[in-house]
Image (tube, grey):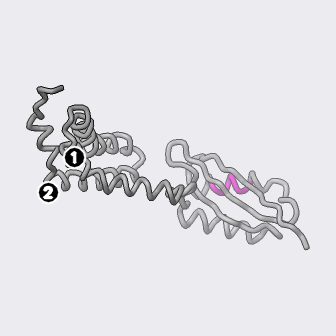
Amino acid sequence: DPGFEPSLEVEARGSPDILDLGVAILSGFVAAYALGRPGVANTLAGVAIAAALVPPLCVIGIGLTNDQPMVAANSAILLLPLMINVAEQKRQGQSKPLTYPVAAHVHEAVVDYLESVPEVTLVTIGRVSVEPASSVSILLATPGTIPAGLKDELTRLVHDVRGGSPTVRIIVLQEVRE
């Protein structure tokens, strides 16, 4: 639009200052906190994105579509570290764990129980998801077959020690005998 005049809000986003950087950083802290709190994650992460990313992204679009490249470039300054971080994460691959650790007392109970089971070794144990759809995966290794009833015993043990009734998955790796 040849008669385009940026509004005060667009101008403010087109020349970010320390306050804008502070809002972006604070929003990042809120988003990080939300990722650690599953019940709050969706709400707070959405608010953080709305406060930190949407206004600068809108100004970039407004600047580019209205032949105001400097407004767009200045607004992109706040997004540049984010874009670099996203590109680096994509290059490195999966950064979040596929499983989360179980409580120490659950881990200890499973280890103690498996000490009495010959030729069965615990490789790892972890929570696959968070409440309410929680599940626990136990990865075992053995050169033979697992004893009958082991899955039921481990499931009962996890339910008793952890509480509740999460789904317990037992995955067995077959070791190669020499």
- Number of marks present in the image shown: 2
How far across and how far down the image is residue 89, in percent? Answer: 46, 57
Judging by the rendered image, the residue that carries numbered circle 1 is 75
169 horizontally vs 37: left or right: right
Against 44, residue 117 (above or below) is: below
> Where is residue 126, by image quadrant?
bottom right
Mark 1 vs mark 2: which is more N-terminal? 2
Front-lying residue, 39 or 113? 39
How far across and how far down the image is residue 153, in percent? Answer: 73, 55
Front-lying residue, 53 or 14? 14
Decide whether residue 154 is among the magenta residues.
Answer: yes
Q: What span is colored magenta in the figure?
A: 153-158
Asked which secondary structure carries label 1, the reply is helix
Judging by the rendered image, the residue that carries numbered circle 2 is 18
How far across and how far down the image is residue 161, in percent? Answer: 59, 58
Residue that appears at 63% across and 61% down: 125
Decide whether residue 108 is among the magenta residues.
Answer: no
In the rendered image, which quarter contains the N terminus?
Answer: top left
Residue that appears at 60% across and 46% down: 165
Front-lying residue, 7 or 69? 69
